[in-house]
Amino acid sequence: MPRILKFILFLVVFFMFFEAGLVSSYTIVTSQPPDIEKLFDFQINAIASIFNFEGLNTTFTPTPDSYNITNDIEVSEALKTKGGIDGINLDTLTVTTFADTSNENFQVNITATGYKESISGTGSNSSGGTIVIAPNETYSIRATAVGTMKAKGVEVNVNTIKIVSIGRLYANTNSSI
């Protein structure tokens, strides 16, 4: 066997053992199955920072395209209903996609910030007591749906909205307002 072929074979075997060791050590340390994509992204970022490659990360993990929502009120109402929250901040409602928007229907990712309200007060309305309505808990909502490209942005089919995750960002533990 020629020397160059032996050297290339050695590099391939070394790379395979290195990756297998990385995956197995990740599993041992975290006691969870490894996220292979995240591990490869970590390695690419480390190598790119050493050699200072510009735009290498966007080649492997492109950024999603962001679009305006044409039916934002209907989408926020559907997110409120399906997420079990009191309201959606329309300024944070965004739609992104990696899909080809020239297709009639395509998958979109929806992100928004929602809240649950807390009502507190003293006395009753007839006695002139104060009633304070304040957002008590803030949530981050991620969902998927099917969208259709329109002239002014993406129209989301509200019947296809599926909640992916709802994470609590803030909870007001102060009971007196």
Image (cartoon, rainbow, N blue to C red):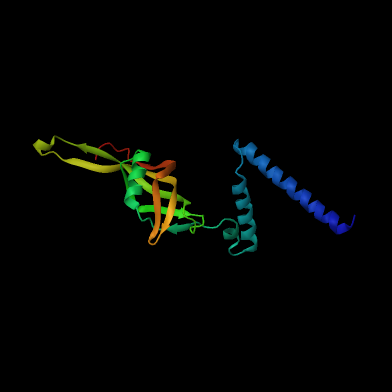
Front-most of residues 65 and 174: 65
Q: Is residue 52 left or right of residue 78?
A: right
Q: Is residue 138 left or right of residue 7?
A: left
- Residue at the image point whose x is 74% and y is 47% from the top: 16
- Quadrant of the image occupied by residue 62: bottom right
Residue found farthest to the right: 1
Front-most of residues 27 and 116: 116
Q: Is residue 166 above or below residue 51?
A: above
Q: Could you tell me residue 127's position as x and y percent?
A: 9, 36
Q: Can the viewer see residue 36 in this picture?
A: yes
Identify the image quadrant of the C terminus.
Answer: top left
- Residue at the image point whose x is 43% and y is 46% from the top: 142
Q: Could you tell me residue 170's position as x and y percent?
A: 37, 43
Q: Is residue 21 above or below residue 3?
A: above
Front-most of residues 58 and 176: 58
Q: Can the viewer see residue 90 in this picture?
A: no
Q: Is residue 168 left or right of residue 41?
A: left
Q: Is residue 169 above or below residue 90?
A: above
- Residue at the image point whose x is 60% and y is 52% from the top: 41
Number of labels in the image equals: 0
- Residue at the image point whose x is 85% and y is 59% from the top: 4
